[in-house]
């Protein structure tokens, strides 16, 4: 990356920012160089993941949060990364109504970027991490990462956030229960959005009860397998944060101030407890591991003579060889290692 | 694996089956040997993925499908793999009501197995594939794979199925729209479950309209980027299957016969069009690639001197080195390649 482009990025030039994000997204050589050059200037932004089932109103909540943040006295700069393929930010709502955010798009302190990529090995998480670093180096104070809940890829994305907000809506008991089982454990803040719908109070109480069950479990370690107990104990000692359950009506900006306070309280908690550093370290560790895995696979692939993979695959299709044996054979056949 | 264990598996011995599944799940040496030995006997089962948002009633639908299958004249043997962490099959409903399936559990022609693993590199997809192979070799005719929708890991799981059923429930327009945007493209059959709820007809019509939009898009390739056009064209030529939209009330077994007919029609379509073989090939290709990636990472890790990863990570944490440079350094430092 040219020194000029980096300087412009750090000065807050939106064109420089757009250009670097595109370079990074296309996984070009220029993108790698840019990430390399800007890495020393990262590590300051507060990364906040917003996740939940489709239809929970995550985009509206992100929208409302960004507005509220910009109204604060210090008017922090806000970046929005929409990883959710169903998000209106990503154009996923082409088929229906689009949530419009004209104010945000005209605010020079807000930058919205969607993530079109799906499917590459570690694609979503790697790309989100890379985008976060660019925004971080560009001086964005808060990075809101919107992602749809439940899948492993989304959990990976959430893992790189400092603070994870799980959004739910008032619903029948069985719906709530099934959503929670998978996702409650990753929530730092729980939000019942669309709280003007019937059953909001009940949902809040239900989530609070589930949280209490989760936390009381750690004090009855005797009932768990050894591994589970160790995890529970670790969580207990390093994580006295009790996720608050908040009500919002995002499209009317109700409850957003409280949500913001909870976000800031969680950030303070992370820094004071040392967990901020732990999370940063984990995110960097994963980034290194991903880069290593990708590099190893590329090397192996480049060292393989053309057609050999297809030939071997054919033998597997014909059940003359198992996938495991084929892998062994192809590993030995590559000159790239 | 002992020849006896393999023979017992092929004879339909449930204890042998359980034992091999456990060996495979624990990724033990015995598990690898078992997969190796049974691989020549795989390739016959019809793998059916059932996916959709939490609360859509996937488990009830799987339950009803299994019962209906067992009532057929040829009474095919049915395996159920519950990958969905929120499924009652996996014990995800510990916190609330459990869908009980006493009949199924007493039927010797049905085997239910849940998948507890989350988080390993390619973990879910690899484990599901391995389980499918065991069931396939054990003579199970149909393998129902239940998974929660939306995430990349779930899409990976679905990719190994021959037939993918996407389950939805009647809902408001915006909910449906947001769910569909991500998941419609992987559906071979669409089901509106809980069809006794208000809005079922509307949901069916909505889904049909979305499908038509999706298919008409492929004839307006001029509006797409070149890559998109190629994909659309390929899909058009190899995939004249038009996903039917069906209504079910799973807990009352309504609409299940029609769903079964659609499943069987899709299986016939796959075989006649040659797409069955294409899917098999793709699944095996992914299995080989996963095994190669895992092996490369293991080799690299074993060749690394203890403590070096941590030291390098520390330099990255202190911003003295970027994750990319660290990866390069650690790759060169390993003796395992």
Image (spheres, coloured by chain):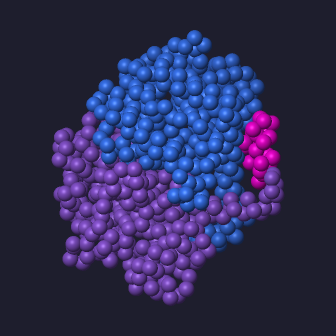
Chain colours: A purple, B blue
Q: Is residue A139 left or right of residue B23?
A: left
Q: Is residue B30 left or right of residue A166?
A: right
- Looking at the magenta stretch, what is its main secondary structure? helix
Q: How many marks?
A: 0
Residue B177, given in percent of the width and then of the height, sits at 37, 46
Residue B162, given in percent of the width and then of the height, sits at 60, 34
Quadrant of the rendered structure where residue B175 is? top left
- The foreground one among B309 and B46 is B46
Question: In the figure, A30 relative to B18: above or below?
Answer: below
The magenta span reads A309-331
Q: Is residue B84 left or right of residue B234?
A: left
Residue A210 is a magenta residue = no
Residue B214, given in percent of the width and then of the height, sits at 49, 45
Question: In the figure, A195 relative to B329: above or below?
Answer: above
Q: Quadrant of the C terminus of chain A?
A: bottom right
Examine the rendering and report whether any part of residue B88 can be seen.
no
Quadrant of the rendered structure where residue A264 is? bottom left
Residue B139, given in percent of the width and then of the height, sits at 66, 22
Q: Quadrant of the N terminus of chain A?
A: bottom right
The residue lying furthest to the top in this view is: B73
């Amino acid at each position: 990356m040219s020194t000029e482009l980096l300087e412009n990025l750090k000065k807050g030039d939106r064109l420089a920012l757009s250009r670097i994000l595109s370079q990074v997204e296309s996984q070009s050589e220029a993108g790698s160089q840019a990430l390399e050059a800007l890495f020393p200037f990262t590590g300051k932004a507060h990364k906040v993941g917003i996740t939940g089932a489709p239809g929970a109103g995550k985009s509206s909540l992100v929208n409302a949060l960004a507005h509220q943040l910009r109204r604060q006295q210090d008017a922090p700069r806000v970046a929005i990364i929409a990883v959710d393929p169903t998000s209106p930010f990503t154009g996923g709502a082409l088929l229906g109504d689009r949530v419009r955010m004209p104010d945000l798009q005209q605010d020079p302190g807000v930058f919205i970027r969607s993530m079109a990529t799906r499917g590459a090995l570690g694609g979503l998480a790697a790309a989100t991490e890379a985008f976060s670093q660019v925004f971080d180096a560009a001086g964005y104070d808060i990075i809101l990462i919107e992602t749809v809940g439940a899948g492993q890829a989304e959990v990976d994305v959430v893992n790189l956030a400092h603070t994870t907000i799980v959004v739910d809506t008032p619903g029948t008991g069985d719906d709530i229960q099934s959503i929670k089982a998978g996702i409650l454990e990753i929530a730092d803040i729980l939000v019942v959005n669309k709280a003007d719908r019937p059953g909001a109070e009940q949902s809040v109480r239900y989530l609070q009860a589930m949280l209490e069950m989760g936390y009381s479990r750690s004090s009855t370690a005797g009932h768990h397998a050894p591994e589970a107990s160790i995890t529970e104990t670790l969580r207990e000692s390093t994580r006295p944060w009790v996720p608050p359950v908040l009500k919002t009506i995002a499209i009317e900006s109700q409850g957003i101030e409280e949500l913001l306070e909870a976000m800031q309280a969680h950030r303070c908690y992370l820094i004071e407890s040392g967990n901020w550093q732990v999370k940063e370290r984990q995110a960097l560790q994963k980034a290194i591991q991903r880069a290593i895995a990708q590099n190893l696979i590329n090397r192996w692939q480049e060292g393989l003579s053309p057609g050999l993979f297809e030939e071997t695959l054919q033998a597997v299709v014909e059940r003359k060889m198992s996938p495991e044996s084929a892998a062994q054979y192809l590993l030995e056949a590559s000159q790239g290692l």
